[in-house]
Image (cartoon, rainbow, N blue to C red):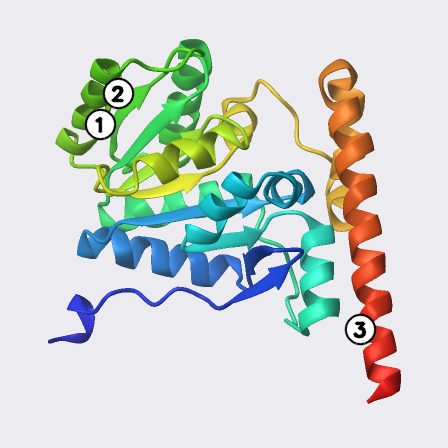
Amino acid sequence: MTPSSLPVQWPAKHEMFGVAVSATCYDEVVAKTLAAAQRGQRALLTFAAVHCVMCGVQDAAHRTRLNAFDVVAPDGQPVRWSLNFLHRAGLSDRVYGPELTRRVCKAAAEQSVGIYLYGATPQVLEKLQANLLTMFPALKIAGIESPPYRALTADEDAAAVKRINDSGAGILLIGLGAPKQERFAYEHRDSIKAVQLCVGAAFDFHAGVKKTAPAWMQKRGLEWLYRLTQEPGRLWKRYLTTNTQFVLLFAREALLRGRRGAEA
């Protein structure tokens, strides 16, 4: 068996409040995603900010889904900081979904790997497709699809899977928002042939319909605050509850580790 035919080995994971989070970086995720796509190897990847981690903490069924993913990368700075503090991961940067999306599309264009865009509205998808092709003219977009907001019927679901597989895309980018996108990827882990990446708001950002936080806010873990100012009615409850709970869980874990260290 040649090296190019061996299954991709995904980065190591570390337990964070019951959720297994990957200690990884942009270059590793991009390289392994493209390698898996080239081999026709199915895989599930998502990019976990605090909200994504807490969805897994609070919902046992969703925790099972997340822990079945090949990669749960640290999208949020607090998630990266926690990996570094609790597990000495030594990560110098997070793996931000929108930036990872850009890098994956660049690599896919260079390696002639087709992508499929699934999620958002038809208007957002049209803008997203146009902007991606402006950035990467050689990018092969094998299909775009805006699913209905309601649950799909069995026939609709089967038809969507067939469209994705028949397109020949090696990478499926899913922009349905957490936890819906992770649920979709998990439920189709055996039926969709492509590498599935749950990239959340990346569709809106690259389509130009939403703005990303300034770099200084992103670096300091304040992206949540910027997004809250943009969509206060939708996001205030999420951030008030999940951010607070995450901080409390981290403080408890840090205290317990400190006590164990003092007793050792």
Residue 157 marker: 2
Q: Which residue is drawn at 47% across and 25% down?
A: 176
Q: Which residue is drawn at 36% across and 25% down?
A: 118
Q: Is residue 117 left or right of residue 239?
A: left
Q: Residues within 10 Å of mark 3 (few under 14, many from 20)?
A: few
Q: Quadrant of the C terminus?
A: bottom right
The kind of residue tagged 2 is: Asp
Q: In which quarter of the image is the N terminus?
A: bottom left
Q: Mark 1 points at which residue?
A: 161
The kind of residue tagged 1 is: Val
Residue at mark 2 to residue at mark 3: CA–CA distance: 46 Å
Residue 44 x, y percent position in the rendering: 37, 47
Query: In the rendered image, is residue 147 in sight?
Result: yes
Image height check: is 126 above or below 261? above
Report which quarter residue 115 is drawn in: top left
Q: Is mark 1 on a helix, strand or loop?
A: helix
Residue at mark 2 to residue at mark 1: CA–CA distance: 6 Å
Q: CB atoms at circles 2 and 1 under 8 Å apart?
A: yes
